[in-house]
Image (spheres, rainbow, N blue to C red):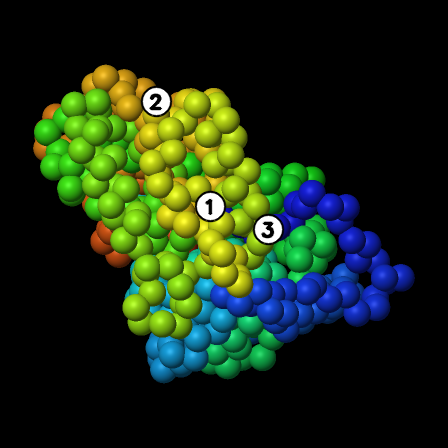
Amino acid sequence: MTTSIASTTPRPDLSAAAAADRRLERTDPATGRPAAPVRCATADEVDAAVRAAAAAWPAWRATAPADRAAALRAAARSVRDAAGELGALLRATTGRLETEARASAEVAADLLDEAAVAGLGRAGRVLAGDPAALDVVRREPRGVVAVITPWNDPYPAAAGLLAAALVTGNAVVHKPSERSDAPGVRLAELVAAALPADVLRLVSGDGGTGEALVAHDGVALVAHVGSTAAGRRIAAVAGARGAKVLLENGGKDPLVVDAGVDPVVAARQIATGAFTNGGQLCTAVERAYVVEEVADAVVAELARLADAVVVGDPGDDATTMGPLVDDEQLAVVEEHVRGALAAGAELVTGARRLDRPGSYYAPTVLDRCPDDVDLLTAETFGPVAPVVRVADFDEALRRASASAYGLAATVLTPSLAHALRAADVLDVGTVKVNAVFGGAPGGSADPRRGSGGGAGYGPDLLDELTVRKSVHLEGLGAP
């Protein structure tokens, strides 16, 4: 995922002396034409937002949990009612297909509702102490939480974290990615309208704005979904002052195809994982390890599916894949594909920028990819399906596990024994068997290694956003 507090360019000075307007130029990814710029909040404005949230926090903390839950349900209704507007904003900003973008907004509403229910059952526990005393472990809100979210699927990423922080009694300062600022701002406005003033504050900007927020002494916890580079910078800045961080960062998710899998089914799963939203999803399929026995048939069908993708205007119902978010992301994809081809990967189809305005790249399939290229080791975030042929399932698992990332993995197999072994040995937060996307509500997972750390969703996220306090209570007795 990409949002940035870290950058390849020098971080801007956000001191009071640099308070003049600083704006980021943006383009429409579908046309290449200029879009509305993003104004970056100054350090003074970040400070004001944190202070306002801190001032609003005591009353919100003292609000009955049922009333906090009711506010989230009201926010969910507002988001659901505005799903069409939110979908159009996300399409215009990032190139997401409008039908997918609207569905993403509806998922955000679902997450607000889910937190409203889950938040009523996480108050703490009673201990088995002396019968003449009362011993409890309370769960208390942390204070002001900074929520920093990505551009590629911003509605669920933001809604899940905002809801969990708010329902547990925290105040929030939210910074959406500069690449999807308008959608992030609108979602935050809808949620904030259901809350008391200043319980949820918003700041816009790039990595410099984010760093000012993360470094602020008034922020108790930073929850970030985005790139690994950004997450590591956040961990360093927040950790230097002792603040807690929750990180869901980059991924390089593998998909394993076992012997005996129908090649058509396997190709369809790889294509879904690699080409949905142009491959710009944190759990996109970025590596496919295919047992040699079925590899020829899988690659042939995968090429057919790639060539059948309708790339075009994300607002057109006939389009099945829109543009990449911008030319900067397209350049990363081009570099990774060029490097793999130069190292010996075989081009099956694609591997080119499309000759039309906007940031469009052809769905791409490469075969026999070598292990040590960026296309297999670094997050590509584009519509590329690199295939690695392996001798058997054991080799597939071994090579799928050899990664600096540990977000998720998919295994396609007809063997229950192989499915259970994969679930056990793959060192990732989420293992999916025989379906690249899906999962029941209420799950929780901890990403591993370069993919971050700490529960990023589900009921365990509520625990991450609170602190425990042990209380022992007994009477003084007779004088």
> In the rendered structure, are the residues bearing label 3 and label 2 in contact, judged by CB atoms less than 8 Å apart?
no
Name the N-terminal-most of marks 3 and 1: 3
Which corner quadrant of the image does residue 118 belong to? bottom left
Name the N-terminal-most of marks 2 and 1: 1
Give the secondary structure at mark 1. Answer: loop
Residue located 21% across and 29% down the image? 296
Give the residue at the far right of this rendering: 17
Give the secondary structure at mark 3. Answer: helix
Label 3 – label 1 distance at C-alpha:
15 Å
Q: Residues within 10 Å of mark 3 (few under 14, many from 20)?
A: few
Which corner quadrant of the image does residue 434 belong to? top left
Asked if residue 430 shows in the view, the reply is yes
Report the amino acid beneath label 2.
Answer: Arg
Report the amino acid beneath label 3.
Answer: Glu
Residue located 40% across and 67% down the image? 314
* Residue picked out by circle 3: 328
Label 3 – label 2 distance at C-alpha:
30 Å
| Rendered location of residue 81, percent (x, y) | 36, 82
| Rendered location of residue 301, percent (x, y) | 21, 41
Residue located 69% across and 63% down the image? 24
Residue 399 tag number: 2
Residue 352 tag number: 1
Give the secondary structure at mark 2. Answer: helix
